[in-house]
Amino acid sequence: MISRLALEGWYSDSINTLHEALYQDDYDTLDKVLGALQEVTRMAMKRYDGIHLPELDQIILKLANKLHNKNIKTKASPRKSILLVSELYLHGGHSRIVEDIIDLMSGSCVVLITDYIGNYANGRLRLGEIYNRLEGAAVITLPEGSNISKTISAINTINLVSPHKLYLVLHHADSIGYTASRAHSVNGMKTIFLHHADHKPTLGATLNYHKHLDITGELLKNCEDNECKNCVLLPLYAEDHGANTLGIKCSGIRFASVGSRGKFVFEGKLNYSERIVTCLKASDNSTFLHIGQIEQIAIENITNTLSQNGIKVDRFYHIDYTPSVWQTLKKNKVNILIGTAPYGGGRTAIEAQGAGIPVLWYNEGISSIYNAKNLNWFDNESLRGAIRSVCKCYLQYSKGARDFYLKNYTVKNFSKTLELL
């Protein structure tokens, strides 16, 4: 398999340089290769969506072969699992999947955090509440050190625990985690790859696994089309907190969006501030709630844009963090969820629909997680049309959203898939 990037000079030159470096065996060189893998992956992420990086994965395999300790042989222990993760957050669907897997897992579990960027070591991130939310697992963070020292530490931990299953829930550029997952000495261990929902270029996607998990049918097909093996659909789930029983009026609509800063832009046709204005102008006395961490400068951008359009700024309000999007949407009596753009939030859409809240979703090519296929938008004019459509038949859309959740995204569907892995 050859990626489309192989025809680009900067990428092919990087691959050749890395292959030449791997003629050396000293740790200083291997440390630099691990760092270079991260940089090349980040460059690919900035330029492309939905492509794979088989050439970098071959570098991962060569690295792993050099670091594999042939003198160590161990056998996988039944009812033991490791979730190998890069970082964990209080918000975001990727982190919540880790919690969901632990909650439904039988046997003992270790969460091994690579901290490959060093955010925990330097204090930019803190585990804090994460420990409470992962109370069913032992949490280990790799100590501060070089790329190569962290990789060796991760390999040794995997060998020591000797799990029956190793789940990879890694960031795209986490060369430490992906290399360690191939350099272990555990005979009979099953490695399960969870592909990040944004499908940005990532390390590891083209390697062979016991199972390769994607969370939507569209993403799964993309991987199969790129010759990925053993692909399985893992339907997300959110705990059922019941449905809203609200109707809707022509005035006073309560809108909401959910997401951190990376989900939004403040320029062009997808300008978040202008999108909020569009919603608030569509209904007299309406309000708009943002749930999620965004910088103060972004909030000021929103409020300034509202003022410039003659809209009272108190019609917009913000909740920085919530342990349950579902319950927060219900508590604030939200009528309509506006999907984020340019990047959507799959888990948020599922929670909103479970609560009986119609989702007006940005059309980025993924439609299977939404009940109302016609409520998509791509600019503010089409968003206005979607708002008009949902207001005409609100109760029908609300019931459809709830029924869609019950059919596709309950814990029963999620746990059934996990049992088959």
Image (cartoon, grey):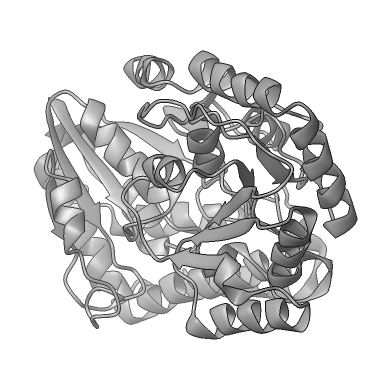
Quarter where residue 17 is shown: bottom right
* Residue 71 seen in the figure: no
Residue 388, horizontal then vertical, whole percent? 83, 41
Residue 224, horizontal then vertical, whole percent? 67, 30
Residue 145, horizontal then vertical, whole percent? 22, 78
Residue 360, horizontal then vertical, whole percent? 71, 42
User: What quarter of the picture does the C terminus occupy?
Assistant: top left
Q: Is residue 137 above or below residue 257?
A: above
Q: Residue at x 69, y 71 (%)?
A: 273
Q: Residue at x 74, y 66 (%)?
A: 277
Query: Observer-nearest residue: 56 or 246?
Result: 246
Quarter where residue 263 is shown: bottom right
Q: Is residue 88 above or below residue 211?
A: below
Q: Is residue 11 above or below residue 181?
A: below
Q: Is residue 322 left or right of residue 36?
A: left
Quarter where residue 72 is shown: top left
Q: Residue at x 36, y 74 (%)?
A: 117
Q: Is residue 250 above or below residue 414?
A: below
Q: Residue at x 75, y 34 (%)?
A: 390
Q: Is residue 282 left or right of residue 17?
A: right
Q: Is residue 99 left or right of residue 386?
A: left
Query: Observer-nearest residue: 258 or 90?
Result: 258
* Residue 68 seen in the figure: yes
User: What quarter of the picture does the N terminus occupy?
Assistant: top right
Q: Is residue 389 left or right of residue 90?
A: right
Query: Observer-nearest residue: 129 or 18?
Result: 129
